Image (tube, rainbow, N blue to C red):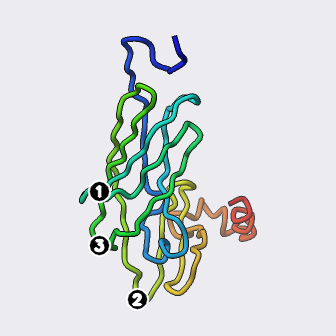
Amino acid sequence: MPPTGFFPGNRKKPEFTCQPRLQPYLTKDVDHGTPSLLLMTTLHQWHTARLTVWTEDNQVVARLQINSSDSSVPLSLEGVQPRVEPYRLLCSLEVFPQGPRVDWHTSLVYLPEPANGSVSQLDAKTGGLLVRGVSDYPPKPIFPLGFYTDFGGYIAQNLTKLRELKQQG
């Protein structure tokens, strides 16, 4: 029996999720870098798969072969217009040689650049917050500090802890 990872009569679907790395994306993010999708999948190392990602109006924003080591793939927003409403994305994974197709639905927030102020973004890869002014790029990590994030006075007693946390990423 060839090593396909599937036993005869057992067509178990791989687990699969995909989500945009940043929420929201803005036009400056598209101009200065490559937006990406984070993938989590249970593909075995000898499997490859075809990943296709569509917007709700059937525009393909990603189509490529992936394997078990891929955790991030580029996302092309070239023909996609920024708007206030989130785009619904369909991520479709087809496993080769004889595997099933697995679909995952997610949202993509792609906003126009604001005229003034600052922008906060959530980085799904690190779980951190990024911030930048309208004229700044790239965004920088920020450690939110306020009433609910004071950690019982831990940071207030020694502000050098913030520098330590920043160095640790």
**Residue in the image at 55% along x and 69% along y:** 33
What amino acid type should be assigned to the residue bearing mark 3?
Val
Residue wearing tag 3? 84
Where on the picture, by quarter, is residue 136?
bottom right
Q: Is residue 138 above or below residue 11?
A: below
Q: Is residue 5 left or right of residue 143?
A: left
The circle on residue 88 is 1
Q: Residue 152 in the image: x percent, y percent?
A: 60, 60
Q: Secondary structure at mark 1?
A: strand
Q: Is residue 55 above or below residue 100?
A: below
What amino acid type should be assigned to the residue bearing mark 1?
Arg
Q: Residue 124 in the image: x percent, y percent?
A: 50, 56
Q: Is residue 142 above or below residue 114?
A: above
**Residue in the image at 45% along x and 86% along y:** 117
Q: Between disc 3 and disc 2, whose residue precedes?
A: 3
**Residue in the image at 42% along x and 54% along y:** 62
The circle on residue 115 is 2
- Distance between the alpha carbons at the discs numbered 2 and 1: 26 Å
Q: Residue 121 in the image: x percent, y percent?
A: 48, 68
Instruction: Tell me if label 1 and label 3 are in contact, CB under 8 Å.
Output: no
Q: Between disc 2 and disc 1, whose residue precedes?
A: 1
Query: How many marks overall?
Result: 3
